[in-house]
Image: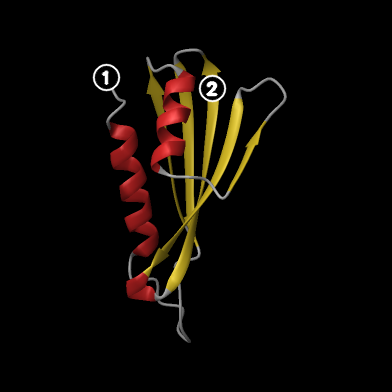
Amino acid sequence: MEQESFTLEGIDPEVLISKFTSKFPPAFSFINFNGTTRVFIIEEFYFRVSSNLSAIVIFDFKNENNCLINIIASGGATGLLQIKWGSEKSMLKKLRNFFSRFTI
């Protein structure tokens, strides 16, 4: 399991969520009662490890211009020795690159 957290500022929450879900269609999503926390689970198949990898992406909107993002990638290990071959880090990098487009 690999995880990373960071904060984005100055981005419209609806624009961020819309772009995220169109780039990474979620297998599951959850929105709390007042819409300040959104949870998405995405899955990808990594051929080099013949394994599905999942990532949980949690958006915690502090206000309309400040969002804390937590990413947890897991499930990339495969085979008898459970070797990951860097697939969890690859998923984190892909998500980090996506979110870096929104930094000011």
Q: Is residue 27 left or right of residue 94?
A: right
For image coordinates 38% across by 18% down, the residue present is 9
Front one among 1 and 46 = 46
Colour setup of the view: secondary structure
Image position, residue 10 (x, y; %):
37, 14
Which amino acid, mark 1? Ile
Q: Which residue is mark 1?
A: 104
Image position, residue 15 (x, y; %):
43, 22
Question: Residue 61 — which label?
Answer: 2
| Residue 81 vertical placement versus 97 (above, below) | below
Cα separation between marks 2 and 1:
17 Å
Image position, residue 26 (x, y; %):
52, 46
Secondary-structure class at tag 1: loop
For image coordinates 32% across by 38% down, the residue present is 98
Which amino acid, mark 2? Phe
For image coordinates 61% across by 28% down, the residue present is 37
| Residue 37 vertical placement versus 64 (above, below) | below
| Residue 16 vertical placement versus 75 (above, below) | above
Residue sitting at the far bottom? 80
Question: Residue 52 — which label?
Answer: none
Front one among 41 and 2 = 41
Image position, residue 33 (x, y; %):
72, 24
| Residue 27 vertical placement versus 18 (above, below) | below
Binning the other alpha carbons within 10 Å of mark 2 as few (below 14), some (14 to 19) or many (20 upward) gives: some
Q: Earlier in the sequence, mark 2 or mark 1?
A: 2
